[in-house]
Amino acid sequence: MGSISPSTTLDFYSSPHLAEHYDLLCAHEGAFFTDINVFYKELRGVYDRRINHDLAESQPEKKDEYAQSLAVVDVGTGTGRALFELIQRTRTASPPMNLTCAHFLGFDLSPHMVARAARTRDIAAAAIGKLDWRCASALKLDAVLAESGLSDGQVDLLIFADGGFLHLETEAQARQFLSLVARALRARSGRAVLAITNQASVQEGTDLSYHDASGEKVQEYSSVEFPGLVYRNRLAGFHQDGAVQESTYQFEVWRRRKGEEDELVESCWTKLKGRAWSDAEVQALITACPGLKLIETAQPDRLQTFFIVSAES
Ligand SMILES: C[S@@+](CC[C@H](N)C(=O)[O-])C[C@H]1O[C@@H](n2cnc3c(N)ncnc32)[C@H](O)[C@@H]1O
């Protein structure tokens, strides 16, 4: 099996093959994806608060209806991994959660990631009300919510998973995003969970294998969506400019047929760029954002820090 030099450079998330590759990579990086426990805990919290506090006194007859009409938004949803698993988790909730009128919305900058979410993360509307996938930047949160029929102050839970916040590369972008979150969240009872990747742990490579600093390890995954295709990926370069980091990968797609030599069908460089935010920087940005309050930080593993915030009117 040979290899040829790639001629094109793509963003890490920008083709149907790369979208499936991301899912396969996640499936093999189990250490990273304990995040659903954190998101579920917050979802449970907002659900219970709506039943028990916000409405019980003013409109007791409507409390079930209100609890069921929660709005959950996943920013940078990618292929919908976190939103989908979060919904699955609610099915075994104890006490049970009735989400038959809930609105779940996932949106992402990459049309290829969202298209795969829509293809592969189907959930019967009967169980959860409504599930929307949209293509947009995190910095357009207000517009996405408006298009989806959600007004300011109507989001009960907002998540930005898998260190997605790193794609906000400047302080100005981070400030803009946080002020949109403050506007979006339901006052007091709503929560946002923003995940920051611990870059030192990623580069150390003990818990994650995709960032192999030696550049020698080629990861190979068989496609499920495109039978007969095999993805091969290796870290080809890493560059840091201040806090902004850029990893370059060599990504190849091979066709494998029994008894024949593998045939190379696609070869490209991919770039994964983001800002290595420190916990202290994010905490300072949240604290300085008008209308936003830091409730707590959580660090269930060495790979991520979660900032849990609310909106105060
Ligand atoms: C590390 S992946 C996380 C995907 C998903 N949230 C998960 O947990 O599996 C980061 C995602 O953020 C998306 N992204 C990058 N910049 C973005 C932006 N400015 N607005 C929205 N999404 C963005 C990428 O396309 C990619 O799908």
Image: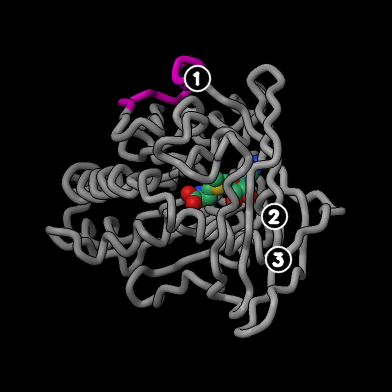
The numbered mark, 2 or 1, whose residue comes first in the sequence reads 2
Above or below residue 86? Residue 137 is above
Identify the mark at residue 278; answer none if there is no mark.
Answer: 1
Give the distance between the C-alpha atoms of the residues marked 2 and 1, in whole angstroms.
29 Å
Relative vertical location of residue 258 with respect to residue 156 in this rendering, above or below: below
Within 10 Å of the Cα at label 3, are there few (<14), some (14-19), or many (20+) other Cα atoms?
A: few
Residue beneath disc 2? 251
* Disc 2 and disc 3 in contact, CB within 8 angstroms: no
- Can I make out residue 102 in this image? yes
Q: CA distance from mark 1 to mark 3?
A: 42 Å
Residue under the image location 44 percent in, 68 percent down? 130
Q: Of the residues tagged 2 and 3, which is closer to the observer?
A: 3
Q: Is residue 173 above or below residue 266?
A: above
What are the residue bounds of the magenta stretch? 278-297
Q: Amino acid at mark 1?
A: Ser
Please state the horizontal and vertical placement of residue 243, each as a whole percent of the image: 63, 20
**Which amino acid is tagged 2?**
Phe
| Colouring method of the image | one colour
- What quarter of the picture does the C terminus occupy? top left
Q: Quadrant of the N terminus?
A: bottom right
From where the camera sits, is residue 309 visible? no
* Residue 288, x across and y down, in percent: 50, 15
Classify mark 3: helix, strand or loop: loop
> How many residues crowd around disc 2 within 10 Å: few (fewer than 14), some, or many (20 or more)?
many
Left or right, 51 with respect to 169, comes to left
Q: According to the image, label 3 marks what residue?
A: 1
- The x and y percentages for residue 77 are 53, 53
In-front residue for pair 159/182: 159
